[in-house]
Image: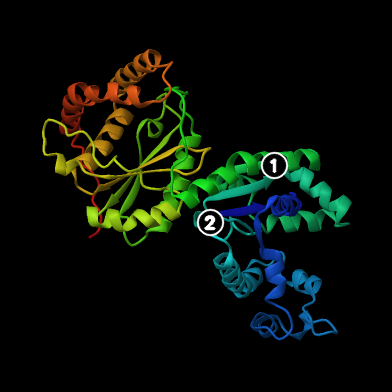
Amino acid sequence: MLKIGLAGGIASGKSVVASRLRERGAVLVDADALAREVVEPGTEGLQRIVAEFGDEVLGADGRLDRPKLGALVFGDSARLAALNGIVHPLVRARAAAMVEAAAVNAVVVQDIPLLVETGQGSNFHLVLVVDAPDDVRVQRMLDQRGMTREAAESRMNAQASREDRLAAADVVLDNSGSLEDLAKQVDELWDGRLVPYARNLAAGTRAARNGGPVLEPYREEWAKQAARIAARLTTAAPALILAVDHIGSTSVPGLAAKDVIDLQVAVSGLDAADTAVPLLAEAGFPLVPGAGSDTPKPTDPDPRQWQKRFHANADPARPVNIHVRVAGSPGWRYALMFRDWLRDDPAALRLYAAHKADLAGRFAGSATTRAYAEAKEPWFTDVAWPRMSAWAEETGWTPPSYPS
């Protein structure tokens, strides 16, 4: 199933997005609803809250008086942390049970107000953030909820900043305009990305990629995207993955590249790589058959030393290549050395950029990037290898080491 984390600050419009996604067919797991459920009379949650905050948080009917509790915790970080420590684990357990009960091919959307604050983003295939400027959200609280400005700002300050939420987002839905515009964004996302992603995930296939090589100017966002994807990979197989490194052209500042994120996953051996195959597929990165080795370089012609497992993303909107290599193997070392050489040597960067631009122009009319990639390969052996080997010797470059 495709797991989506939905986040947004107070008065951002997150509940509107959640309702629209449910209308389109998503299984909605609403953390706010669950938070109410786990503190109903007779529950463990309510008993623990009363033990922590006293009987004054109960109403005459024995139910939790939320305004009273809110007045106690908002603005007091220690008391808020105590409340979160009670409620959040109970909500997560109930949410996990609902997800477990969903169909294999379902799109499950978990509406989590504090997703960013609690660091849960790597548990999902995608994080959706509903966004609106802070001043717009404050005005909505004044107009629609009758809150004072001081109370509205206090509620906002108790949550993650807008910048932190945007940094955690794979998809941002802009709710600074009308609700009709917001609904249109949700529909386009559902039809164009979520449904195809869920279909690919259920089938265990990568997303289709069409078109020839198109080089785009370097984007700082590539590094941020790579970090979020790396966290998902590590979460998927923590006992097997030694490290995840951003490699390839998108990892080199200033280098034009195809909009494809390449990540290298280091493992202890190919048996670990094979054990990780279903775990990475479940996380959204199915194995690509027939792509299990790199091209050997002159110093090590034994092709067995260059074996790897290659995965690609099932998400149609974010191409990702995952190279699972044995730590210490020639292919693992080459990928890291090549990246660091380009980052460190401006002349090398210019040389490779010119080579890429020439080939991209030559194969611009191709239906795929296969011919472009194959044409690049001799350059890595004949030009890059001797130059970067000399650079490594001159600079004393060594690859990273990992705890055994």
Q: In front: 31, or 102? A: 102
Question: According to the image, label 1 marks what residue?
Answer: 187
SS of the residue under disc 2:
loop
Name the image quarter holding residue 193.
top right
- How far across and how far down the image is residue 264, in percent? 33, 43
SS of the residue under disc 1:
helix
- How far across and how far down the image is residue 170, in percent? 56, 44
Q: Is residue 204 left or right of residue 46?
A: left
Question: According to the image, label 2 marks what residue?
Answer: 1
Q: Does the residue at mark 2 contact the one at mark 1 (Cβ under 8 Å)?
A: no
Name the image quarter holding residue 31.
bottom right
Q: Residue visible at 57% across and 72% down?
A: 93
- How far across and how far down the image is residue 92, in percent? 58, 69
Q: Amino acid at mark 1?
A: Asp
- Most extreme residue toward the front is 203
Label 2 packing within 10 angstroms: few (<14), some (14-19), many (20+): many
Q: Residue visible at 41% across and 19% down?
A: 366
- How far across and how far down the image is residue 245, in percent? 35, 44
Q: Is residue 222 left or right of residue 7?
A: left
Q: Residue visible at 43% across and 27% down?
A: 258
Q: Is residue 54 left or right of residue 351?
A: right
Q: Amino acid at mark 2?
A: Met
Residue 267 numbered tag? none
Q: Quadrant of the C terminus?
A: bottom left
Q: Residue visible at 49% across and 55% down?
A: 122
Q: Is residue 307 left or right of residue 90?
A: left
User: Is residue 386 positioned above or below 285 on the image?
Assistant: above
Could you tell me how many numbered marks the image carries? Answer: 2
Q: Return the disc, 2 or 1, that comes first in the chain's sequence.
A: 2
Q: CA distance from mark 2 to mark 1?
A: 19 Å
Label 1 packing within 10 angstroms: few (<14), some (14-19), many (20+): some
Q: In front: 23, or 13? A: 23
